[in-house]
Amino acid sequence: MSPLKAGIAPLLLTLGLAITAPALAQSLSPLEKSGLTPSDRKAFRLQVGNPYERRMTFALLPMLPDYATSAKGVVVKPAELTLGPGITRNIIVTFDIDPAKKERTIALCVMPKAIDSPILPRVCGLYTGRMAGRGS
Amino acid sequence: MRPVSRLGARVVALAATLAPLPGLACSISLPASGTLRNSMSNTVLGSQVNGNTPATVTMVLPLLSGVSVTVNAPTVIQSPPGYNAAMETREVAYTAAVIGLIQLANQGYTSAATNFSTGLLGAVTLTMTVHNRVNNPNGFAPGTYTTRTLVTCHP
């Protein structure tokens, strides 16, 4: 994939670009999920897919619900995965919940790793864990 | 965009529509990357400068409850030595339509992050046309420039 680029010419800067760029794609399912946990940790099983025509490696990034700030106390297994065309795999995201609070919501974002493209496509989901019997 | 890439985008969109996807998912792809060019005054780089060569983004949205799409302003991730970015501003503009027919969003050039909701859609393909523009009254030094725009599909 060629990026949105510019190169100088005598009177004109020309930005090189991929007219025949192959598709980049990823999918994440479900986009929202919530559940109870008897402890201070909650795990969800999600599906990451590559529905298109080329092999790709995706990074799985835990974020706060603003989709901009990295989230701490979150483990994603695997943290990245390479998928062939049409392949979907399960991943597990596990996160800590502050015992002083009833619940925690985190975001998980899936994006191509080492992408060389002017558009960075990203799919993010929201996942909420609630501690059972904690002052609700 | 050249006719070849427009055709490519539609083929990909059709394939995406037919692809089996799990429920409550979002699938996003990038059929075409677009091209930036310089203005005659050497103060604007853009995909609508001296032509029309946007990037395209395709999404498959099986959600009945709809999802949102957020588009961040572009960043310049590559520029040549000697380029003075002090006065630089970066903007993005886009349109979004369902299978190229029903328009969901028409955002003019902005430096802010913007978003739109897809509403109560089911199993549709959403195509976005995205333009980038970089303004700099100091001009652009000769070399290679690369912009990047983050497009996020989320609940």
Image (spheres, rainbow, N blue to C red):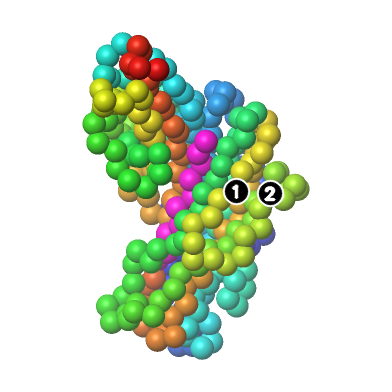
Q: Dividing the picture into quarters, in which one does residue A8 lie?
A: bottom left
Marks 1 and 2 share the same chain? yes
Can I make out residue A91 in this image?
Answer: no
Q: Nearer the viewer, residue A113 or A34?
A: A34
| Residue labelled with disc 2 | B104
The residue lying at 65 percent from left, 28 percent from top is B64
Q: Nearer the viewer, residue B64 or B99?
A: B64
Chief secondary structure of the magenta span? Answer: strand
**Looking at the picture, which amino acid does disc 2 mark?**
Leu
Q: Dividing the picture into quarters, in which one does residue A102 lie?
A: top left
| Label 2 element class | strand
| Residue labelled with disc 1 | B116
Residue B120 in percent (x, y) is at 68, 34
- Disc 1 and disc 2 in contact, CB within 8 angstroms: yes
Circle count: 2
Q: Nearer the viewer, residue B77 or B14?
A: B77
Is B149 on the left-hand or right-hand side of B52?
A: left
The residue lying at 41 percent from left, 44 percent from top is A66
- Mark 2 or mark 1, which is nearer the start of the sequence? 2
Spatial CA span between label 1 and label 2: 8 Å
**Chain at tag 1:** B
**Looking at the picture, which amino acid does disc 1 mark?**
Phe
Disc ID at residue A75:
none
Span shown in magenta: B146-155
Can I make out residue A67 in this image?
Answer: yes
Quadrant assignment for the N terminus of chain B:
bottom right
Residue A63 in percent (x, y) is at 34, 39
User: Quick check: A117 above or below A37?
Assistant: below
User: Quick check: B28 above or below B113?
Assistant: above
Residue A74 in percent (x, y) is at 27, 30
Residue sitting at the far front: A135
Residue A128 in percent (x, y) is at 40, 26
